[in-house]
Image (tube, rainbow, N blue to C red):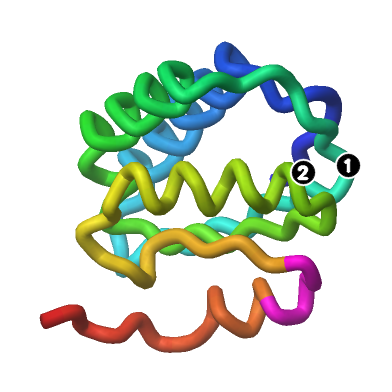
Amino acid sequence: MKLTGHADPPGVRALITELQNRADAHTQGTLRILMDESELQPGIVGFSDIADMVHDWRTAPALRSSRIAIVAANPFIRGLNQMFRLLANLERKDSLNAFTKRADAVAWLLTAATVSP
């Protein structure tokens, strides 16, 4: 999945909904998603916006059992992804990660998920 344009709260919230729909439709094994945000530009995203996105994530149970790798060369975009990840305090630490290089993201995505204690 390739994202372009500006990262803004309505777009991210719509993305979470779309990912949830895909995860709901996936019935076998762990859904693995590669998101390419290489061409995504920073938008205005506040702390409360990220809190709303975290709420959307938490109400999407199928997403929490998925594995999502994000390619984001732009340090601001990668930072927004990492901030989301920290604020979400993801139950499975191996469910979402952001990378600068596509090869690293693909390698992480294809590795077997480790079991968290």
Q: What residue type is labelled 2?
A: Lys
Comparing marks 2 and 1, which lies closer to the viewer?
Answer: 1
Q: Quadrant of residue 53?
A: top left
Q: In which quarter of the image is residue 43?
A: top right
In the figure, is residue 61 to the left or right of 56? left
Q: Which residue is farthest right?
A: 39
Can you identify the residue that label 2 sits on? 2
Above or below, comparing residue 8 to residue 72 in the picture: above
Image location (x, y in percent) of residue 62:
27, 45
Q: Which residue is farthest front?
A: 47
Cα separation, mark 2 vs mark 1, equals 8 Å
Q: Image point 68% across, 67% down: which residue?
A: 99
Of 69 and 98, nearer the camera is 98
Q: Image point 72% across, 44% down: which residue?
A: 77
Which mark is drawn over residue 55? none
Looking at the rendering, in which quadrant would you find the C terminus? bottom left
How many residues crowd mark 1 within 10 Å: few (<14), some (14–19), many (20+)? Answer: some
Q: What residue type is labelled 1?
A: Glu
Of callouts 2 and 1, the N-terminal one = 2
Residue 97 on the magenta segment: no
Q: Image point 83% across, 58% down: which residue?
A: 73
Mark 2 vs 1: CB contact within 8 A: yes
Image location (x, y in percent) of residue 17:
43, 25
In the figure, is residue 110 to the left or right of 4? left
In the figure, is residue 108 to the left or right of 71? left
Image location (x, y in percent) of residue 93:
32, 68
Magenta segment, which residues?
100-104
Q: Which residue is farthest left?
A: 117
Above or below, comparing residue 13 to residue 89 in the picture: above
Of 87 and 105, nearer the camera is 87
Which mark is drawn over residue 39? 1
Q: Under tag 1, what secondary structure?
A: strand
